[in-house]
Structures are given as structure tokens and as C-alpha cells.
Image: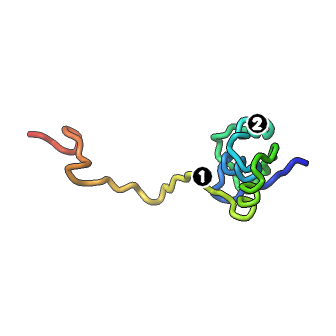
């Protein structure tokens, strides 16, 4: 029986592989099975087909606590530039005269 699940907010393809199979070892097989790249961001409610469950204990754990490790850029908050001698670059923001 093939297991499937829909993505939640913040999940990437590798999270789904671990959730459905209990391991990361099936990432290439599942990428082929689902006809997608492992690095392409997933939209919420994208259905992912799982392959063979390799570690049932981990799959059971992630069935209740879904991993969500996708990185998202927050464009509203600019990254503050760090200050101090440990962060300055000579002739860029530390000018030698």
C-alpha cells in the first residue's frame, strides 16, 4: 500500500520523505516517484506519494509531529548590518586613511 500525505506550512520535500518513510534514504526514489526536484519549494496541500517505509517508529513519530524545516525569506524585515571591529572589512566599511 502506498502512503501519501499533503504538505503543511514550512515543509520541504526532504521533510515529507522523512515523514512518509521514516528516513532520508528514500529521497531520490521519492523524487522520481513524485516527478519533482528535491530542492523546489512545495506549496501547502501538495500531495506527496511515499515509497517504502524504512523506519516505522520514526514514521509514526512524524505522523503526529510533522517536521517543517523549509527556509523562507522574510522580505519585510531587512537584515541588520552587524557592527564592530569583528565584523568590519578593511577598505569596505572600515576605511584606512
State the residue at coordinates (73%, 50%). 22
- Residue 57's spot in the image, x, y percent? 74, 56
76 sits to left or right of 44:
left
Identify which residue, 26 or 90, lies in the foreground: 26
In this view, the mark in front (1 or 2): 2
- Residue at point 82%, 44% (across, down): 52
Question: Eyeballing the image, is 37 above or below 1?
Answer: above
Q: Residues within 10 Å of mark 2 (few under 14, many from 20)?
A: some
Position of the C terminus, as image quadrant, is top left
Q: Residue furthest right?
A: 1
Q: Residue at x 79, y 51 (%)?
A: 47
Residue 32's x, y, as percent?
77, 35
Is label 2 in a helix, a strand or a loop?
Answer: helix
Q: How many marks?
A: 2
In this picture, residue 81 sits left or right of residue 70: left
In this rendered view, identify the residue nearer to me: 88 or 28. Answer: 28
Report how far apart the C-alphas of labels 1 and 2 lie in the structure. 20 Å
Residue 26 in picture, x, y percent from top left: 73, 40
State which quadrant residue 68 falls in. Answer: bottom right
Q: Which residue is mark 1?
A: 70
- The image's mark for residue 80 is none
Q: Residues within 10 Å of mark 1 (few under 14, many from 20)?
A: some
Precedes in sequence: disc 1 or disc 2 = 2
Circle 2 is placed at which residue position? 29
Task: Give the side of residue 35 with respect to residue 68, left or right.
Answer: right
Amino acid at each position: 500500500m502506498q502512503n501519501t500525505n499533503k504538505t503543511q506550512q514550512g515543509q520541504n520535500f526532504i521533510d515529507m520523505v522523512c515523514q512518509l518513510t521514516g528516513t532520508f534514504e528514500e529521497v531520490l526514489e521519492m523524487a522520481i516517484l513524485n516527478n519533482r526536484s528535491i530542492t523546489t519549494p512545495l506549496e501547502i496541500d501538495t500531495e506527496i506519494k511515499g515509497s517504502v517505509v524504512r523506519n516505522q517508529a520514526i514514521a509514526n513519530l512524524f505522523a503526529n509531529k510533522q517536521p517543517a524545516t523549509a527556509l523562507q525569506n522574510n522580505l519585510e524585515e531587512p537584515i541588520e548590518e552587524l557592527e564592530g571591529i569583528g565584523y568590519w572589512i578593511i577598505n569596505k566599511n572600515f576605511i584606512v586613511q
